[in-house]
Amino acid sequence: MSEFARPALSEIYHVLAAHRALIVHCSGTPKGAGSNFEEPFPLDLAAVVAGKCQTGLSCSTVMPGDEFGDFNTANATGCVGVVLGLRSAQSLRDAHPRDCGSFMENGVRQVPRARDMAAADIDATISCRPRDAYNEWVIADFTVIGFFAAAPFRISAQVPVDFPDDVPDYLRGDETAPGFKSTSPDELAALAPELPVFSFVGVDLVSWVGGRWEQVDHSDVYF
């Protein structure tokens, strides 16, 4: 694996702090847009928490004020995910204001457009991200800091088929089809009680504590 120039880890975290941004790998909605796994939620995120996919995950940086509900203008590929940290500066395999063009090959996420990056280049992947789109950071050799959950807490799931009103009961079955449903901060917290659940409320970065959101500092996440 070739190593490209990166600023010190402290400089990368300084860029994140300047934007109050989190590195998040989402459980994709729709499935496949933001996840490398065939497993449905929550098995996809549980795999990351268990330390799988250390060879590279597609992530986005998200900030207070970002859009998560509207598919057309969302600033991430989902509403729910895991917050990742870097073990070293080389953990940041690649980053672009929009798409890196990354892809999976033999179980490894490839980054064909990777290049040397200074702190200003990394900052530009956030500050130059379109307002109605998401950026991509490819992260390898990571740590899992916590979960992320933003309203409307939508996840991909198999849901009951919605039959038309004129279909008689005897023709209605128990079929399911790919769709969406909502999870909750409590459901996420139950997956790994040792991990905090982060979100944004207005301009604040918050954590789910005792059934309510409490404000936290960005330095409590990345330090």
Image: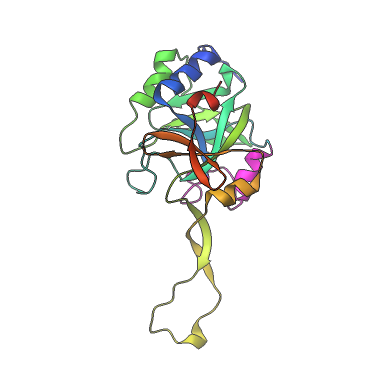
Q: Nearer the viewer, residue 194 or 6?
A: 194
Residue 203 rendering spot, x and y as whole percentages: 37, 34
Residue 24 rendering spot, x and y as whole percentages: 51, 35
Residue at the extreme right of the image, as rendered: 50
Q: Residue at x 50, y 81 (%)?
A: 172
In the rendered structure, the answer to whether residue 103 lies left or right of residue 133 reads: right
In the rendered structure, the answer to whether residue 215 lies left or right of residue 193 reads: left
Residue 28 magenta-highlighted? yes
Q: Residue at x 53, y 14 (%)?
A: 10
Tell me which segment is drawn in magenta: 27-50
Q: Residue at x 49, y 14 (%)?
A: 11
Residue at the extreme left of the image, as rendered: 131
- Residue 76's place in the image compared with 94, above or below, is below
Can see residue 4? no
- Residue 168's place in the image compared with 141, above or below, is below
Q: Residue at x 38, y 49 (%)?
A: 69
Q: Quadrant of the N terminus?
A: top right
Residue 40 rendering spot, x and y as whole percentages: 59, 53
Residue 160 magenta-highlighted? no
- Residue 123's place in the image compared with 84, above or below, is above
In the rendered structure, the answer to whether residue 196 lies left or right of residue 130 reads: right
Can see residue 91? yes
Residue 61 rendering spot, x and y as whole percentages: 45, 31
Q: How many marks?
A: 0
Q: How is the image coloured?
A: rainbow
